[in-house]
Image (spheres, rainbow, N blue to C red):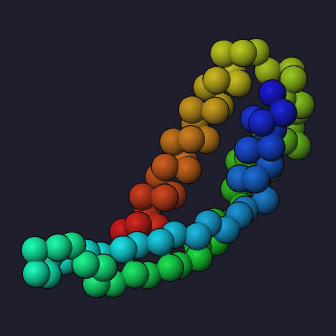
């Protein structure tokens, strides 16, 4: 339960993520690193997560509600990560 609260808190406050992209090409029969790019992306605070924390305590939610909220948050994170990669 604490991990879920911490995850929601992270999303509510926003966070940074470091991303490494490497590009390889075949040279002389071997794969060689051609390009390496390191980026740091800031994910802005999510007001829905903040509202969830402010509206009520997570311990008041049923297991089904917690699982539903977890899936929703994971889906939002995946969507954000997908937009960042584009």
Taking 10 as reference, is 44 above or below it? below
Q: Position of residue 84 (x, y in %)?
A: 46, 67
Residue 6 placement: quadrant: top right
Q: Is residue 39 left or right of residue 60?
A: left
Residue 57 placement: quadrant: top right
Of the 4 image quadrants, the one containing the C terminus is bottom left
Q: Position of residue 53 (x, y in %)?
A: 84, 42
Seen at 53% across and 78% down, the residue is 39
Q: Is residue 78 left or right of residue 70?
A: left
Taking 14 as reference, is 3 above or below it? above
Camera-nearest residue between 9 and 19: 19
Taking 61 as reference, is 41 above or below it? below
Q: Position of residue 63 (x, y in %)?
A: 72, 15
Camera-nearest residue between 45 and 84: 84
Q: Position of residue 2 (x, y in %)?
A: 84, 33
Give the number of callouts. 0
Q: Which residue, as the protein is rendered here, is positioned at the far left?
A: 29
Residue 71 placement: quadrant: top right
């Amino acid at each position: 339960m604490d991990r879920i609260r911490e995850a929601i808190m992270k999303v509510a406050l926003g966070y940074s993520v470091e991303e490494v992209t490497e590009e390889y090409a075949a040279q002389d029969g071997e794969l060689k690193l051609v390009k390496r790019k390191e980026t740091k992306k800031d994910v802005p605070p999510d007001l829905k997560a903040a509202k969830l924390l402010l509206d009520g305590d997570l311990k008041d939610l049923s297991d089904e509600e917690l699982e539903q909220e977890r899936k929703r948050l994971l889906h939002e994170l995946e969507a954000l990560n997908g937009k960042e990669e584009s």
